[in-house]
Image (spheres, coloured by chain):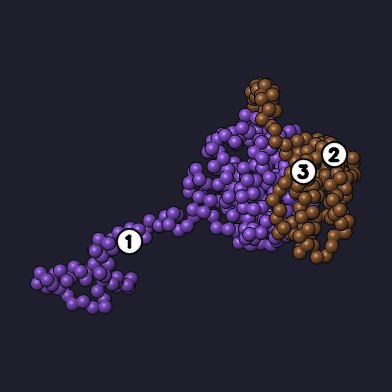
Amino acid sequence: MRLGLTPAFLVKIVSSVVLIPARSVHKSELVKMKLLTHNMLTSKSMKGVTVGYPLGINVVDIKVTEVDFNPEFISRIIPKLDWSVLWKAADTIGQLDDLPKELSQEYENDNDFLKKVHHVLLEVDIVNGELVCPETGRKFPINNGIPNMLLNEDEV
Amino acid sequence: MSRPEHLAPPEIFYNDDEARKYTQNSRIIDIQVKMSERAVELLLLPDDTPCYLLDIGCGSGLSGSVLEDQGHYWVGMDISSAMLDVAVEREIEGDLALTDMGQGVPFRAGSFDGAVSISALQWLCNADKTSHKPVQRMYKFFSSLYACLSRSARAVFQFYPENSEQMELVTAQAMKAGFYGGVVVDYPNSAKAKKFFLVLMTGGSMPLPQALGTDQDSRGVSYAARKEQARKNKGKPLKHSREWILMKKARMRRQEKETRADSKYTGRKRSGRF
């Protein structure tokens, strides 16, 4: 059954190749990977990796966009973050903006602090670059803001 | 109904042409949005609190837009890069990652307040490569999902199970991974509107939410009760019943015919002894 379908696939693939130039014109808006996502991503699905965290960042280009500030969400998400990982990530891409290295106790009422965290978490986007597994050194490319976490068959 | 998962693996089936349908076909968009809204309802998130959610098989981000509208933040994962490209074009708020759900959910423990998935789970039941073992992939998926949800979080999957065995397989693997819950079937009597939602809970067993379109009236009244009702409505008592005999006797008396007096024995059956 699979064999019978193969020619149809080829036709589909060929037609998509033809489409590519038209699409790249379309794609003016770039998307992004936020540092919030980086703070959550791991490579623990890989075979032989136990923790797979934090992933290293090699940045090619970043972009800063404005996102609506929601203090409630920021103060809710802070306990879930690995603060030192976030600080380091912000440091590597040069968006530190005097963010404290240690998390203060009373952050919930400190609006200035929450705004800084908001900026680092949601407004700084990695557009192109790669993520690096800390244990195996395997690189996960980020293209157009989408990290490719797909593993090869021998890595599962 | 044709099943796309029989035609090709998801990363090939959802090519540019197929992905384009998810921005242009208003019927597809409408159905997806409705199912997403119902899935979010089943998540039972706290009111007016922005949550951090995972969208599994987010595709072009239609379900993500529903999450955004309700004030939540989300991350989407999908295996089809063509679909993710469409999501990029739609300028959605959430972040995206290109991943295969059968390879596990690549997030840190306790990251999310909940997870939704619209029409993606059935793809996991297929072996698209020789190395794929659906049961193993399913277990890997559910166990890694369990880990990355916070306690008392829920995961709601809208999916199209092919048959009851497939539904059983999926639920069994989810339970094995530590989830509680089950399948909620909305509109079970309708061929078109019938929808399956696998509702998984992390923090202890709780009653499953009520499915839509299953209230008593729509299930129908039992036939016997209806027959009885019809008789009563006609105004005539059931034949050979006591009421029927009394009615007959009254009629005889009105006609001035000889009639025995009514007693407690009227219309009674003889005991077997006679």
Secondary element type, mark 3: strand
User: Residue B249, located in which quarter of the rendered image?
Assistant: bottom left
| Pointers 2 and 3 within a single chain | yes
Q: Position of residue B55 (x, y in %)?
A: 68, 46
- Quarter holding the C terminus of chain B is bottom left
First in sequence: mark 2 vs mark 3:
2
Binning the other alpha carbons within 10 Å of mark 1 as few (below 14), some (14 to 19) or many (20 upward) gives few
Q: Position of residue B76 (x, y in %)?
A: 70, 44
Check residue A64 in the rendering and tell me which mark sits there, or answer none: 3
Question: Which label lies toward us, 2 or 1?
Answer: 2
Chain label for disc 2:
A
In the image, what residue occupies the spot 83% across and 42% down?
A46
Q: CA distance from mark 2 to mark 3?
A: 14 Å
Image colour for chain B is purple
Q: Amino acid at mark 1?
A: Glu
The reply to whether dot 1 and dot 3 touch (C-beta < 8 Å) is: no
- Quarter holding the N terminus of chain B is top right
Chain with brown colouring:
A
Q: CA distance from mark 1 to mark 3?
A: 74 Å
Check disc 1 and report the residue beneath it: B228
Chain label for disc 3:
A
Q: Is residue A27 left or right of residue B189?
A: right
Q: Say which of B218 and B100 sits in front.
A: B100
The reply to whether dot 2 and dot 3 touch (C-beta < 8 Å) is: no
Q: Amino acid at mark 2?
A: Val
Check residue A121 in the rendering and tell me which mark sits there, or answer none: none
Q: How many marks?
A: 3
Question: Which label lies toward us, 2 or 3?
Answer: 3
Q: Amino acid at mark 3?
A: Val
